[in-house]
Amino acid sequence: MPAVFLSGDQAIGEQARELLGPISTVAVKQATGFYSATMMAPEMCQRLIQEGVKRAVEGRKAMKPYRLTHPVKLEVTFKNIVDAELVSYLPGV
C-alpha cells in the first residue's frame, strides 16, 4: 500500500513529492535552521492535516507504492567523530 499523506516542514513535502510523486502534503512549520522552525498554532495544524488526509484518501488511487531498487546503499554522516567511532564498533558497520 502506498503512502498517501505527509505532514512536516516545507522541505520534507518537496522531497516527498520528488521521490513519491503526487503525495498529499501539509507544511505545518517553516524550517528556519537545523534545529529551529516557525510553528503554526496547533488548532490550525489540526485543521490543515485533517483536510490534507481527506484529500489524500480521496485521491489514493493515483498513488503507486514506492519500490526500492537493489542493492540498497545507506550512507550515514556524523558531525562528531566520537559518535562515528562508537557506531563503528557495532557488528556489520
Image (tube, rainbow, N blue to C red):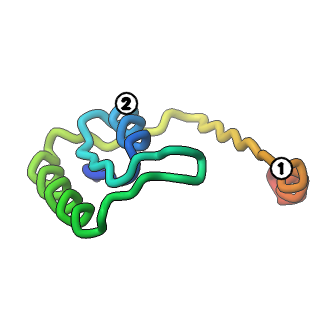
Residue 26: percent from left, percent from top: 27, 49
Please state which of residues 10 and 32 is positioned toward the viewer in this rendering.
Answer: 32
Q: Residue furthest bottom?
A: 43
30 over 18 or under it: above or below:
below
Q: Earlier in the sequence, mark 1 or mark 2?
A: 2
Asked whether 43 or 50 is in front, the reply is 43
Q: Amino acid at mark 1?
A: Asn
Q: Which label belongs to residue 71? A: none
Residue 2 visible in the shown view: no
Q: Is residue 16 above or below residue 85?
A: above
Label disc, if present, on residue 80 of the rendered structure:
1
Real-space Cα separation, disc 1 to disc 2, in angstroms: 30 Å
Is 31 or 16 nearer to us in this picture?
31
Q: Secondary structure at mark 1?
A: loop
**Around disc 1, counting alpha carbons within 10 Å, would you say few (fewer than 14), some (14 to 19), or many (20 or more)?**
few
Residue 15, percent from left and from top: 42, 36
Left or right? Give the position of 14 relative to 53. Answer: right
Residue behind mark 2: 18
Task: Please tell me which residue is depicted at 71% across the width and 43% down the height of the picture.
Answer: 76
Residue at 43 percent across and 39 percent down: it is 11
Left or right: residue 76 compared with residue 70: right
Q: Image quarter for residue 23?
A: top left
Give the residue drawn at x 37%, y 35%: 14
